Amino acid sequence: MTAPTEVELFFMKGKIERWIRFGSPLSERTLDRRRRIATFAPDAVFAFMRWASNGHGTLVSRIDILRACRAGEACSTVPGVRPGAEILLRSIGWEKVQRVLRAIDAVEALGLAPQEICPDHWRHVHNRLAAGLPPRPYTRERHRAWILRSKLATQ
């Protein structure tokens, strides 16, 4: 059995917040009033938000869309994620994070769960935003193609 990926969530109102924007953890356990651990199965896709502020405003705002790796797979280190994960999308700065959130909202508006769509779409969104271009929208046709491709790959 492959070890699951653990994500440390944290909440200190108005100072530091780390939460899951989307994804389906296998379980969550509470460490104390402010900290929880969310556990994800291998290949699970999830969005991890990190935000911090001080008395002068926002210090950091970032979102990572990650895929939990299997044992032996190469993975990237991400603060708060053990042992690490494959980074599908990384965005830093409130303006860029807002663009990613709009892309997530667009997928949800189709009635699809963002963690269940083609992971290539999140790579596409990352690359387009990095180039300063708007990402192409995810469509039901693309999703249908992804489902068919997934079925062929498992046969």
Image (cartoon, rainbow, N blue to C red):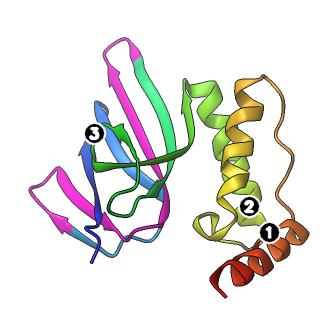
- What element does badge 3 sit on? loop
Answer with the quarter of the image where residue 140 lies.
Answer: bottom right
Q: Position of residue 149 (x, y in %)?
A: 77, 75
- The residue closer to the viewer here, 50 or 40, is 40
The residue where tag 2 is placed is 107
Q: Tell me the distance, in whole angstroms, between the alpha carbons under discs 2 and 3.
A: 29 Å
Amino acid at dot 3: Lys
The residue where tag 1 is placed is 110
Highlighted magenta segment, given as a residue range: 29-57
Local packing at callout 2 (Cα closer than 10 Å; few below 14, some 14-19, many 20+) is some
Whether tag 2 and tag 1 are in contact, CB under 8 A, the answer is yes
Nearer the observer: mark 3 or 1; the answer is: 1
The residue where tag 3 is placed is 13
State which tag comes first along the sequence, 3 or 1. 3
Asked if residue 152 is among those painted magenta in the image, a careful observer would answer no
Q: Which mark is residue 101?
A: none
